[in-house]
Image: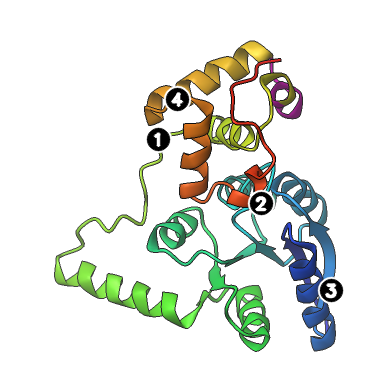
Amino acid sequence: MKKITVLLAEDHDIVREGLHLLLELDGNFDVVGEAKNGREAIQLAQKLQPNVIVMDIAMPMLNGFEATRKIRIAAPDSKILILSAHADDEYVERMLAEGVTGYLVKQNSGQVFIEAIHKIAKGQPFFSPSIAKRLRDLKRRVLEHGGAATGLHLHQKLTAREAEVLQLVAEGHANKQIASLLGISIKTVEKHRQQVMDKLNIHETAGLTRHAIATGVIESCIQDTTDTTDTTE
């Protein structure tokens, strides 16, 4: 029997190693790659074309929202399972809008995790029980109200590039570093940065950082040693 190929995208080593061990013990999976940030996840997904990608949301360099959007293009046949500590409706709805096949919260058991990957590999959606119930309730409400808008396709103020710049700014990278990472000019970075500030109506780096943390773009721990003053060098 051919094994299900899996790519793990998770920045916490102990979590990633634990997931790898669970999959190895099951015997039906082949972990073909591991990524510690969203950019690595995109590169490995494109190279390996795995059956299933297990994706965290809050990852450095590029978060799971933007990584998923790019992976849908780089590896269109790969199924994506979100495994996150965040279970708010906004997170679930946004990831569904990006085309993921399943969503688990990290509080679920290893048995549920294994079951999820088996089903997702077959193209069957799988959600944590609490999330599945909320989705059923939402669907029922939509039917009762004649298909009224549900918010599943959230309006995104920022373009994909602006979202990338926001995350890197919030993580403490200077404009020169961002330009190098994204392969664009410093002037273009400055333009995107200003557009982000204008769209969000936030005009200082500390505010952008708070916004990024509040919306799940980055984890608060990333900023522990970062100076939040503006730097353009």
Q: Which of marks 3 and 2 is in front?
A: 2
Is 1 placed left or right of 38 in the picture?
A: right
Q: In which quarter of the image is the N terminus?
A: bottom right
Q: Could you say whether the residue bearing mark 3 is in a helix, strand or loop?
A: strand
| Residue at the disc numbered 2 | 59
Q: Nearer the viewer, mark 1 or mark 3?
A: 1
Amino acid marked by disc 1 = Lys
What residue lies at 67% left-to-right and 14% top-to-bottom? Answer: 186
What residue lies at 37% left-to-right and 51% top-to-bottom? Answer: 153
Q: Could you say whether the residue bearing mark 1 is in a helix, strand or loop?
A: loop
What residue lies at 76% left-to-right and 57% top-to-bottom? Answer: 49
Q: Rate crowding at label 4 as few (under 14), some (14 to 19) or many (20 or more) other CA atoms within 10 Å.
A: some
Q: Rate crowding at label 2 as few (under 14), some (14 to 19) or many (20 or more) other CA atoms within 10 Å.
A: many
Contact flag, marks 1 and 3 (Cβ < 8 Å):
no
Is 129 placed left or right of 190 in the picture?
A: left
Q: Earlier in the sequence, mark 1 or mark 3?
A: 3
- Report the Cα–Cα distance between label 4 and label 1: 11 Å
Q: Earlier in the sequence, mark 4 or mark 1?
A: 1
Vertical position of residue 6 compared to residue 35: above or below: below
Residue 30, disc: 3
- Report the Cα–Cα distance between label 1 and label 3: 38 Å
Q: Could you say whether the residue bearing mark 4 is in a helix, strand or loop?
A: helix
| Residue at the disc numbered 4 | 197
Residue 157, disc: 1
Q: Which of marks 3 and 4 is nearer the N terminus?
A: 3
Vertical position of residue 15 compared to residue 35: above or below: below
Amino acid marked by disc 2 = Met
Part of the protein shown in magenta: 178-185
How would you classify the magenta stretch by its main secondary structure? helix
